[in-house]
């Protein structure tokens, strides 16, 4: 028996096994590079007596928490050792199914090291940074939820950027004209729904390539809003001064140290997003509605055979996705209290698509991924005013670099719905 096995030669690895080994080696190298950066760039320039003060309170303070004061160099060396240890294990035997958890932990270690480095010899309010991260993640998560609603039903929505931009424009104009925030938000939602209906008509009724249809809508909205902003809003500034939603802290919860200011001292858009994430997650995985949506996205022909109206499900979900994207667009103007500017969404719709992929087409995963991108955006905004020795161009590109890394690293491993992007023709 042994001789027969030996004669047969070594077992040939499957495609998935080869991909897992390649990922193991790449991640190991990434961890070691992160450790080297923490040592060479962060730790070595620090004097031994330098301290980093991480502030954990955000006024107004009800229950004060002591600031975290750390020896900069020693902390950075320790964090680098953790990353190097993870890299060594990853290269030698790997972490198996726990590789994603280890990746997240190393990323947290690197971000913490970066904050310690930035705060060396000065202070940084970490609670304020995390609060800003939630705010910066808001439109990204709205975009991700819009994509999930569409793609779970089998329709690719590249037009999220245009839907959000239209929501920002319409919301600003309507809220400025009426002086009513609620009416402005409603108009934003409707504008996103109209564009969702247009995308559904092109992709489902006329079988236009879904990606091309999405880009056409994006180009249409960018051109139209840019023209109207130049020709109308510049001459009628009273139509571009939307009222701002004030912060609405939740009693008791907002007084919780650290967590309270981050999650419960926000405006109504943040709370609406929390509710929306939970509702969409529950609806997709625990209701008959969600079962039908996922069936249409995985195998529309089988769903049709079972009596599900595939066209109706797809139309409905794409329009719902447009409504959610329009609501996310309202945050740029009404939620922030600023006037509309050309292309002010700045690619957040496309980053939302990356968050959707990163989160595995799951609302909870997409929300977590959106927070990652929001943190990158908040870090570049906060550190750009602290005078750290990094060019401003590098800092401003940080959110987009993170997007490229995530998509390049995860596309091909995250599995989209099987019928995603495939037009359906009823026989």
Image (cartoon, grey):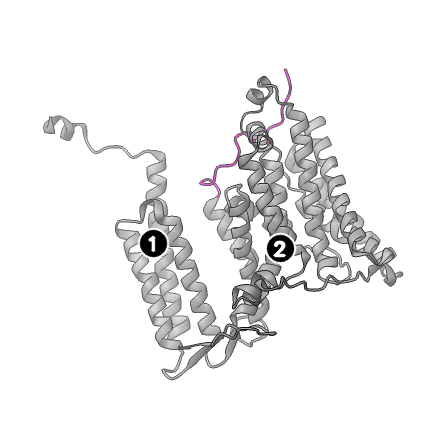
Which residue is located at x 38 percent, y 74 percent? Answer: 43
Work out whether 235 lies above or below 162.
Answer: below
**Rendered location of residue 39, percent (x, y):** 36, 70
The answer to whether 215 is drawn above or below residue 310 in the figure is below
SS state under label 1: helix
- Front position among marks 1 and 2: 2
Secondary structure mostly seen in the magenta stretch: loop
Residue bearing the label numbered 1? 28
Q: Which of 424 and 60 is in front in this view?
A: 60
Q: Say if the magenta span includes residue 83.
A: no
Label 1 CA crowd tier, 10 Å (few <14, some 14–19, many 20+): many
For label 2, the residue is 138
Report the residue at 54% width, 61% height from top. 375
Query: Which residue is situated farthest in the front direction here?
Result: 252
Specify the segment rendered in magenta: 411-427
Q: Callout 2: few (<14), some (14-19), or many (20+) C-alpha neighbours within 10 Å?
A: many
The residue depicted at 36 percent of the width and 67 percent of the height is 79
* Horizontal side, residue 85 vs residue 276: left or right: left
Identify the residue at image location x=56%, y=56%: 400
x and y percentages locating residue 122 in the rendered image? 50, 80
Q: Judge by depth and name the residue closer to the eye, 296 or 402.
A: 296
Total marks drawn? 2
The answer to whether residue 206 is visible is: no
Disc 2 element: helix
């Amino acid at each position: 028996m042994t001789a027969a096995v030996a004669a047969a030669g070594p077992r040939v690895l499957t495609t998935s096994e080869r991909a897992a080994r390649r990922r193991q080696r790449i991640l190991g190298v990434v961890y070691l590079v992160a450790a080297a950066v923490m040592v060479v760039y962060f730790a070595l320039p620090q004097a031994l007596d330098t301290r980093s003060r991480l502030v954990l309170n955000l006024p107004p303070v009800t229950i004060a928490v002591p600031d975290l004061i750390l020896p900069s160099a020693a902390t950075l060396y320790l964090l680098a050792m953790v990353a190097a240890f993870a890299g060594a294990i990853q290269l030698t035997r790997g972490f198996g199914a726990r590789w994603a958890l280890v990746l997240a932990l190393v990323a947290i270690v690197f971000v913490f090291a970066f904050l310690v480095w930035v705060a060396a010899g000065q202070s940084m309010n970490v609670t304020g940074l995390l609060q800003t991260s939630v705010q910066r993640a808001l439109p990204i998560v709205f975009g991700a939820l819009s994509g999930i609603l569409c793609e779970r039903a089998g329709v690719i929505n590249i037009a999220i950027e245009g839907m959000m931009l239209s929501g920002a424009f319409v919301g600003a104009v309507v809220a400025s004209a009426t002086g009513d925030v609620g009416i402005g938000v409603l108009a934003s939602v409707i504008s996103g729904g109209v564009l969702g209906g247009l995308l559904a008509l092109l992709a489902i009724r006329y079988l236009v390539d879904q990606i091309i249809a999405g880009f056409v809508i994006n180009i249409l909205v960018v051109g139209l809003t840019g023209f109207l902003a130049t020709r109308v809003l510049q001459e009628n500034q009273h139509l571009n001064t939307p009222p701002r939603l004030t912060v609405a802290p939740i009693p008791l919860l907002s007084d919780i140290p650290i967590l309270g200011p981050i999650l419960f001292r926000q405006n109504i858009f943040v709370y609406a997003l929390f509710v929306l994430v939970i509702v969409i997650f529950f609806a997709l995985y625990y209701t008959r509605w969600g079962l039908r949506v996922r069936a249409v996205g995985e195998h529309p022909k089988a769903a049709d055979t079972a009596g599900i109206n595939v066209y109706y499900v797809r139309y409905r979900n794409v329009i719902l996705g447009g409504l959610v994207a329009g609501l996310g667009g309202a945050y740029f103007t009404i939620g922030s209290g600023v006037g509309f500017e050309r292309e002010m969404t700045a690619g957040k719709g496309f980053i939302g698509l990356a968050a959707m992929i990163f989160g595995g087409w799951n609302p909870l995963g997409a929300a977590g991924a959106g927070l990652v991108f929001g943190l990158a955006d908040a870090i570049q905004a906060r550190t750009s005013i602290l005078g750290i020795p990094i060019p401003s161009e590098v800092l401003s590109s940080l959110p987009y670099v993170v997007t490229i890394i995530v998509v390049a690293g995860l596309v091909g491993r995250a599995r989209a719905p099987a019928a995603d992007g495939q037009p359906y023709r009823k026989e």
